[in-house]
Amino acid sequence: MLLTTAVVPLTLTAPTAHAALVDATCAGVVHANFNPGLTFEAQTVNVSTTARYPTCVNLSGNGKQLAVATESFSGTGTADCLTGVVGGSGTINWASGDTSGFTYQVTVSGRPDGILELLATGSITSGLFNGDKLTENITNIPNVQTQCLSEDGMTNASGTDDLVISPAV
């Protein structure tokens, strides 16, 4: 009896890597300054914000320890206490020592219950996550109606801030 062995080449390939839907998320509090103060009349306004994120999660797989972060932003646009758009730029300082420069546009939306919400969308333009999309949802800014009716308008406000950084599509 003759035995023969056939050798069949076998090629193994690594599973295809799927890009993360989100690279990083942070939750925290933002403080905003409006100059001049927001009223119920649209006007050109300068906005500066500082945010502190005590909770950040890095989902990108890059190995960076992000844990916490701070953010600063400044911009100019036309806004009132109910609507508006402000564009500008800022920087995120990560716990790892890295930074992310960004630009975005903030849309102002006042709710009937007197709560102000801000939605910021833009992109990371330098540093960590360069080229990614940036979205911030800033909510729970109370007493808008009372402050907006004051002589100086609403000159500052604080609210909760959810930051999401995701790969550009």
Image (cartoon, grey):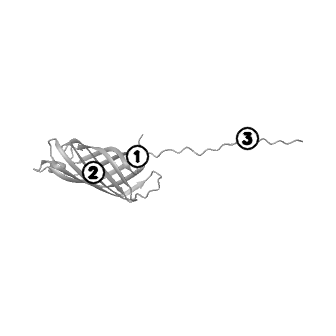
Residue at 47% over, 53% down? 62
Q: Are marks 3 and 1 in contact (CB under 8 Å)?
A: no
The percent position of residue 16, horizontal first and vertical second, equals 55, 43
Look at 41% across and 42% down and name the residue there.
168
Q: Secondary structure at mark 2?
A: strand
Image coordinates of residue 158 in percent, x first then y, are 24, 54
Say which element carries label 1.
strand
Q: Earlier in the sequence, mark 3 or mark 1?
A: 3
User: What distance separates the C-alpha of mark 3 from that of mark 1?
Assistant: 43 Å
Along the line of sight, which residue is nearer the eye, 136 or 69? 69
Residue 101 place in picture, x, y as percent? 34, 50
For this orientation, the residue located farthest to the left is 151
Label 3 sits on what residue type?
Answer: Val
Circle 1 sits on which residue?
166
Q: Is residue 86 left or right of residue 21?
A: left
Tell which circle, 2 or 3, labels the residue nearer the N-terminal end: 3
Q: Is residue 79 left or right of residue 52?
A: left
- Inspect the image, locate mark 1, and give the three-letter code of the amino acid beneath it: Ser
